[in-house]
Amino acid sequence: MADLGLDKDLANKIATIIRLLASDKAGEAAAAAEALPRVLQSAGADVINGVAERVETDNKLSETEMQEIFDAGVEAGLKRGGQESRKNGGAPQFPSARDMAMHCYQHIDDLDSDWEREFVTNMASWTRRRPLSVKQQDKLETIYLKLGGRT
């Protein structure tokens, strides 16, 4: 896979122009179609070929990129799990989402924000019917611990 070697500003500019190609405003899409070759050319001929190669290869991540993402995730997990994660040899073991939601619901008056109270009310209902998204699970765990829940 080609490493385009673009600085972040130029990469963002190219991405913005590509997105404008799909504009429902004819003038905006036409201006983007005219600007894209100019911007790519100014970045160098290798950039044009690199963009084409990325499109052809389905924009897969390189081994190095995957390793960087993995390492960042491990580091974030260690920060989040803290000492407890290291003590038991893995991530803290939370109760089921349903049990956490019910604990939070029982302590709903201890929450500071209306958003958190609405979220907990929703979780008490939703956890009976469907699994939570990763983001919902993470937020529920945070509120659960905030309300004195134990792992």
Image (tube, grey):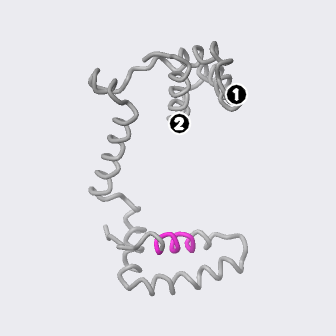
36 relative position to 119: left or right: left
Which residue is drawn at the image coordinates 68% and 25% (left, top)?
117
Residue wearing tag 1: 118
Sequence-wise, the earlier of marks 1 and 2 is: 1
Q: Position of residue 78 (x, y in %)?
A: 34, 35
Q: Position of residue 69 (x, y in %)?
A: 35, 50
Q: Position of residue 2 (x, y in %)?
A: 32, 70
Helix, strand or loop at label 2? It is helix
Residue wearing tag 2: 135
Taking depth in this image into account, of 59 and 76 the one nearest to the observer is 76
Circles 1 and 2 in contact, beta carbons < 8 Å: no
129 relative position to 12: left or right: right
Image quadrant in which you'd find residue 105: top right
Helix, strand or loop at label 1? It is helix
Which residue is drawn at the image coordinates 55% and 72% (left, top)?
18
Point out the stretch of residues depicted in magenta. Answer: 10-18
Q: Residues within 10 Å of mark 1 (few under 14, many from 20)?
A: few
Type of amino acid under label 2: Lys
Q: Position of residue 142 (x, y in %)?
A: 52, 28
Q: Residues within 10 Å of mark 2 (few under 14, many from 20)?
A: few
Type of amino acid under label 1: Glu
Whole-angstrom CA distance, mark 1 to mark 2, is: 16 Å
What kind of secondary structure does the magenta stretch mostly adopt? helix
Which residue is drawn at the image coordinates 57% and 83% (left, top)?
35
90 relative position to 148: left or right: left
Asked if the magenta segment contains residue 12, the reply would be yes
